[in-house]
Image (tube, rainbow, N blue to C red):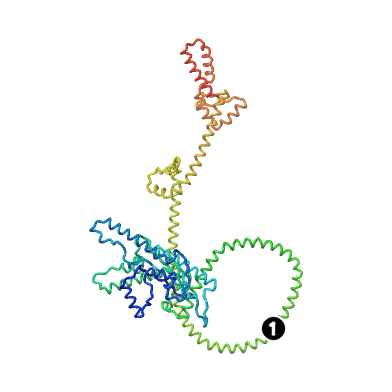
């Protein structure tokens, strides 16, 4: 059984002013509040930690369980250290200002400044409740335990989220077991340099933001401030319901707010809890699906082994099954005969019962008509509630669809920009520039500024794609250069060995003339794809025969040369030999 949610937020100071102490004493005498109400940070933290003497409302305290952060008794020391640091910073700021401007900067916070935010969240199912005159312990079923554990986790996550949004830091979360209902205490301090947390309370922040209108009385101004406070805290309660309560089947309001009868409200609570339990089971089922699939594979392997065993056993059972089938048919015939006899006897009894039933139905018809009228009214209210819920759900789905549509449009624009970059690369307006020791860059040389922005936006996706294309093209060019060099080397070697020559008399350019030997034809096959280029290169070389003739004539006049002429002869001879070597 679930119930309405309960969550409360309050702020506390390190020390309470004497005026407030007197007011609390007066209210206690009048019976409006208990005098033992906790008022300052130390009292609140020691009550949460169940320190002896700090919990007069609990007769038999139990040790609380720490769920997050530090022990509550350490929180006052944390706050005091931050107050001391803030005091040092304020004094340094005052010293940095001229003497006439220091009055507006306080040296420290007031002793009754609000420095702690305490939140209490309660689960609306008691530990023990009376049913049919007996005390029954709740949370015995696995479903109840799982819902309570999920409520704990969601409440702590919600506390972290609220603290981040309000500029707070969650420092401690404890769970109590010694009061009527399960509940959590969440303690938070300011996250910034200023330890004052008054502006972090959503209700007080909204109330302080209400400005006085011209001609407005104090009473009217306070009324508008109180309305703003209530609206802010109602929004605070709604956020807790949206993030936590509805996930575990808790209600936002009690039966009076829903304007439902006791039974209708009870059915509504049961429906909410059933929905939360179903969602929890679905999440648990999804978590165990992976394990189930692994177990299924293991069972399939085991099933294959069992099938083999069953085939062996089934052959022995076939004969026994046939004999047992005959006995079963005889037994069914006997049972059929007995049932027919019993039917005749029961028919007389049904006739008498039918007459009595018709009289009872006439009495109940009138009662049913009255209940139907009441149920119709209740169904009408439930239908209106479902329509409102469905409208809210459709609104959320519409927003989700719009968000997905925007994501799809962004993805389409990104893909279109990538294709635009590929077309620009093919048109040579986009260059792929490789840098030494660094990442390659894309340089756009076009005049379209819009295209430049679009390509810059997808540069991280476009660079690896064009890089692969560029590297593939460069690899093909490198292979072609190697084939040309190999063909030129073979042509020069054949020219040096006299296996080919060049015919320069053709009108369309020089052509290679190859000898008739098998070796010459084999070399020609290696040059064949580049014969025109090889003929052009060989045509630019001198005739090997003339080089030999010059060499022989110079050797003949070697002995009659002077020393200076001999040096010129040596230089010329070296040049001829180098030319001959290159030709070979």
At 58% from the left edge and 88% from the top edge, which residue is drawn?
A: 357
Q: Is residue 559 above or below residue 418?
A: above
Q: Is residue 96 above or below residue 208?
A: above
At 48% from the left edge and 85% from the top edge, which residue is drawn?
A: 370
Coordinates of residue 241 in the picture (x, y in percent)? 43, 70
Q: Is residue 517 above or below residue 135?
A: above
Coordinates of residue 536 in the picture (x, y in percent)? 50, 27
Q: Is residue 532 above or below residue 130?
A: above
Most foreground residue, 104 or 423:
104
Q: Secondary structure at mark 1?
A: helix
Most foreground residue, 425 or 268:
268
Residue at the front extreme of this rendering? 52
For residue 257, what is the image quadrant? bottom left
Q: Which residue is mark 1?
A: 340
For residue 206, what is the image quadrant? bottom left
> Where does the C terminus fall, quadrant-wise?
top right
Coordinates of residue 375 in the picture (x, y in percent)? 47, 81
Neighbour tally class for label 1: few under 14, some 14-19, many 20 plus, Cα within 10 Å: few
Residue at the left extreme of this rendering? 100
* Residue 467 appears in the picture as rendered: yes
Label count reads 1
* Residue 181 appears in the picture as rendered: no
Looking at the image, residue 290 sits to the left or right of residue 429; the answer is right
Looking at the image, residue 245 sits to the left or right of residue 519; the answer is left
């Amino acid at each position: 059984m679930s119930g309405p949610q309960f969550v409360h937020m309050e702020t506390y100071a390190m020390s309470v002013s004497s005026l407030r102490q007197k007011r609390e004493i007066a209210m206690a005498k009048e019976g409006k509040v208990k005098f033992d109400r906790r008022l300052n940070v130390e009292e609140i933290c020691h009550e949460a930690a169940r320190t002896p003497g700090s919990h007069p409302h609990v007769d038999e305290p139990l040790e609380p369980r720490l769920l997050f952060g530090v022990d509550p008794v350490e929180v006052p020391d944390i706050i005091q250290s931050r107050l001391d640091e803030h005091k040092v910073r304020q004094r340094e700021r005052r010293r940095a200002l001229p003497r006439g401007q220091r009055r507006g900067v306080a040296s420290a916070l007031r002793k009754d400044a609000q420095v702690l935010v305490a939140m209490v969240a309660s689960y609306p199912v008691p530990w023990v409740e009376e049913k049919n005159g007996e005390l029954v312990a709740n949370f015995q079923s696995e479903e109840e335990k799982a819902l309570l554990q999920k409520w704990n986790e969601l409440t702590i996550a919600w506390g972290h989220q609220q603290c981040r949004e309000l500029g707070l830091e969650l420092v401690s979360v404890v769970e109590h077991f010694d009061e009527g209902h399960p509940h959590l205490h969440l303690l938070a301090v300011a996250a910034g340099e200023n330890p004052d947390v008054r502006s972090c309370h959503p209700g007080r922040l909204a109330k302080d933001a209400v400005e006085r209108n011209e001609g407005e009385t104090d009473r009217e101004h306070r009324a508008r401030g109180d309305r703003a406070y209530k609206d802010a805290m109602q929004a605070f309660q709604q956020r807790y319901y949206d993030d936590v309560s509805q996930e575990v089947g808790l209600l936002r309001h009690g039966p009076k707010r829903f304007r439902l009868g006791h039974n209708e409200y009870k059915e509504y609570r049961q429906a909410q809890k059933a929905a939360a339990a179903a969602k929890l089971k679905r999440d648990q089922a999804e978590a165990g699906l992976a394990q189930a699939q692994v177990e299924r594979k293991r069972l399939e392997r085991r099933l294959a082994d069992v099938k083999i065993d069953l085939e062996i056993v089934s052959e022995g059972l076939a004969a026994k099954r046939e004999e047992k089938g005959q006995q079963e048919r005889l037994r069914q015939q006997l049972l059929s005969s007995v049932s027919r006899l019993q039917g005749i006897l029961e028919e007389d009894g049904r006739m008498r019962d039918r007459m009595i039933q018709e009289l009872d139905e006439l009495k109940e018809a009138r009662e049913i008509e009255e209940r139907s009228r009441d149920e119709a009214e209740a169904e009408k209210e439930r239908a209106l509630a479902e329509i409102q819920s469905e409208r809210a759900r459709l609104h959320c789905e519409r927003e989700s669809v719009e968000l997905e549509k925007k994501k799809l449009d962004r993805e389409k624009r990104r893909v279109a920009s990538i294709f635009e970059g590929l077309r620009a690369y093919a048109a040579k307006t986009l260059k792929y520039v490789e840098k030494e020791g660094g990442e390659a860059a894309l340089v756009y040389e076009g005049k379209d500024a819009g295209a430049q922005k679009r390509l810059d936006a997808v540069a991280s996706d476009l660079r690896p794609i064009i890089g692969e294309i560029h590297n593939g093209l460069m690899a093909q060019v490198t292979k072609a250069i190697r084939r040309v060099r190999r063909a030129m080397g073979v042509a020069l070697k054949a020219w040096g060995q006299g296996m080919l020559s060049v015919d320069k008399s053709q009108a369309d350019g020089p052509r290679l003339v190859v000898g008739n030997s098998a070796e010459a034809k084999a070399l020609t096959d290696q040059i064949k794809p580049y014969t025109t280029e090889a003929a052009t290169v060989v045509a630019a070389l001198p005739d090997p025969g003339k080089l030999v003739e010059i060499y022989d004539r110079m050797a003949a006049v070697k002995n009659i040369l002077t020393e200076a002429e001999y040096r010129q002869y040596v230089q010329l001879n070296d040049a001829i030999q180098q030319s001959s070597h290159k030709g070979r």
